[in-house]
């Protein structure tokens, strides 16, 4: 259902493109209806137009704040913030906005993004909540990093409950719900994993080597019904100290595949702009380790972290990052992967959950291959956070390593479920919280409540 999204690279009709850009979605949908009914409309264009409807739906849900509402929320957190400062933050693209019905609307979480990415504003927050939480988390990360460097590795055991609760007045009691919950994937940092309990018996469980592994359920609808699984897993991170002088350009068969170097439509593409940007970043350098480090440094020091709307609403994710020089963990990871592949450096996607003590959140990162050291890690968003905080040690660490408090749930970007969904997923590129649909449609975000709750996180001796 999602393997081929190449039509996202196709152009929109000019009138529909203008209506989309100005957020005049009702008029846009009317023209889409007319266009797809034309007997000469190409099938590829029809797919592009139907996807544009989904993008518009995601945009409306993600950008709801009027300028006055966004300013009020900002001043609730930062009482001395002025209108002039707010305008400057908008002009310099710190506060994300989009046109809805021709009027400016701000991203729902633009204020929390401001506080988490701009320390000078976090320091002005009432109660200093964000600053305190961030400092506590940085201290915990520094402790794990010291363990990895002094002892050679760190291992973590964790348990988590993931669930989807069905809540909808648009469903009929008893009708079949098809539901997927993510499972840990095989990768070099996962030592072991197991399912401790399930609220319902899965119809099918994908094999451990599936790139987007899931447990698949079919349940009769009942309002308030929760389908859940308890997972246990152990991860490890070993310390490596690659020496550029020992690096070779060898790509051993079995360690690297053609897929690790390939373009993948619609997002992993070596466009003329991307090639020019990569050339500017790496120059004439030929050493794969140094080239990868220059790409990492560009993303983490020259670009900005931003919370993002649904990836489904971005037709060209890497192009978006390269044009705006901003994006969240997944956008940064995918850009790092694409730039590395453009240089001939094998690179892979990994995503799942980042598990801080007794809490967790969705997170994406990357891997890249350098002989003779094998597959190494790069976490550009954690590296960028370290750079902004002035931590050279932590910034260096996230080029080559990760902290092990993670649950890897996908080892390939844009991988299909097994069994596949019948309808376009809310996240067609990976899944960290699961998906649900009926036999006739995908469930909307307001019909389900997805959650993951960390039960236990123990750093092993």
Image: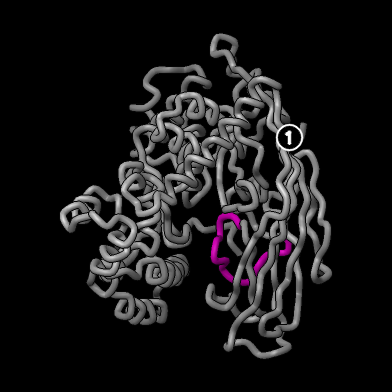
Compared to 426, does 88 lie above or below? above
Q: Nearer the viewer, residue 170 or 449?
A: 449
Q: Is residue 411 visible?
A: yes
Residue shown at 50% from the left, 50% from the top: 265
Q: Residue furthest front?
A: 127
Q: Nearer the viewer, residue 389 or 207?
A: 389
Residue shown at 41% from the left, 77% from the top: 36
Q: Which residue is mark 1?
A: 155
Compared to 196, does 39 lie above or below? below
- The quadrant in which the C terminus is found is top right
- The quadrant in which the N terminus is found is bottom right
Q: Is residue 42 visible?
A: no
Magenta-highlighted residues: 418-431
The colouring scheme, among rainbow, by chain, secondary structure or one colour, is: one colour
Q: List x then y, in percent, for residue 79.
A: 27, 57
Tell me which secondary structure the magenta stretch mostly adopts.
Answer: loop
Compared to 340, does 201 lie above or below? below
- Assess disc 1: are there few (<14), some (14-19) or many (≥20) residues with their C-alpha within 10 Å of its C-alpha: many
* Picture quadrant of residue 411: top right
* Picture quadrant of residue 219: bottom right
Residue shown at 59% from the left, 17% from the top: 242
Per the image, is 329 magenta?
no
Per the image, is 425 magenta?
yes
Compared to 58, does 317 lie above or below? above
* Picture quadrant of residue 53: bottom left
Q: How many circles with numbers are drawn on the protein? A: 1
Q: List x then y, in percent, for residue 148.
A: 66, 26
Q: List x then y, in percent, for residue 127.
A: 39, 53
Kind of element beneath mark 1: strand
Q: Nearer the viewer, residue 408 or 36?
A: 408
């Amino acid at each position: 259902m999602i393997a081929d999204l190449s039509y996202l690279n196709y152009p929109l009709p000019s009138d529909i493109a203008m209506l989309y850009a100005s957020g005049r979605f009702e008029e846009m949908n009317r023209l889409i209806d007319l266009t797809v009914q034309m007997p000469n409309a190409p099938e590829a264009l029809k797919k592009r137009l139907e996807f544009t409807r989904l993008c518009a739906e995601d945009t409306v849900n993600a950008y709801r704040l009027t300028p006055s509402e966004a300013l009020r929320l900002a001043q609730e957190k930062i009482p001395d913030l002025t209108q002039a400062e707010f305008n400057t933050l908008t002009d310099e693209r710190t506060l994300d906005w989009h046109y809805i019905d021709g009027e400016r609307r701000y991203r729902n979480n633009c204020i929390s993004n401001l506080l988490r990415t701009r320390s000078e504003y976090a320091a002005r927050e009432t109660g200093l909540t964000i600053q305190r939480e961030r400092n506590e988390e940085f201290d915990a990360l520094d402790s794990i990093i010291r363990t990895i460097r002094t002892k050679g590795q760190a291992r973590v055991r964790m348990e988590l409950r993931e669930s989807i609760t069905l809540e909808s007045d648009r469903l009929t009691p008893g009708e079949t719900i098809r539901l997927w919950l993510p499972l840990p994937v095989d990768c070099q940092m996962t030592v072991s994993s197991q399912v401790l309990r399930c609220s319902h018996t899965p119809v099918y469980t994908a094999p451990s080597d599936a790139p987007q592994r899931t447990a698949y359920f079919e349940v009769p609808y009942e309002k308030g019904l929760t389908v859940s699984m308890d997972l246990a897993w152990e991860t490890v991170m070993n310390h490596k100290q690659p020496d550029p002088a020992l690096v070779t350009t060898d790509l051993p068969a079995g360690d690297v595949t053609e897929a690790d170097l390939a373009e993948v439509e619609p997002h992993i593409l070596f466009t003329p702009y991307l090639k020019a940007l990569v050339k500017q970043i790496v120059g004439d350098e030929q050493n794969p380790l140094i080239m990868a480090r220059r790409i990492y440094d560009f993303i983490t020091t020259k670009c900005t972290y931003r919370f993002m709307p649904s990836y489904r609403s971005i037709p060209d994710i890497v192009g978006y990052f390269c044009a705006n020089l901003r994006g969240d963990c997944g956008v940064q990871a995918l850009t790092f992967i694409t730039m590395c592949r453009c240089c001939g450096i094998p690179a892979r996607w990994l995503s799942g959950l980042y598990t801080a003590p007794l809490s967790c959140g969705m997170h994406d990162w990357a891997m890249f291959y350098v002989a003779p050291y094998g597959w190494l890690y790069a976490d550009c968003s954690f590296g960028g956070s370290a750079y902004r905080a002035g931590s050279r040690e932590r910034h260096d660490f996230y080029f080559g390593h990760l902290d092990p408090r993670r649950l890897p749930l996908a080892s390939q970007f844009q991988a299909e479920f097994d069994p596949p969904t019948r309808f376009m997923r809310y996240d067609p590129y990976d899944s960290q919280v699961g998906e649900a649909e009926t036999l006739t449609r995908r469930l909307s975000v307001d019909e389900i409540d997805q959650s993951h709750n960390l039960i236990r996180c123990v750093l092993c001796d």
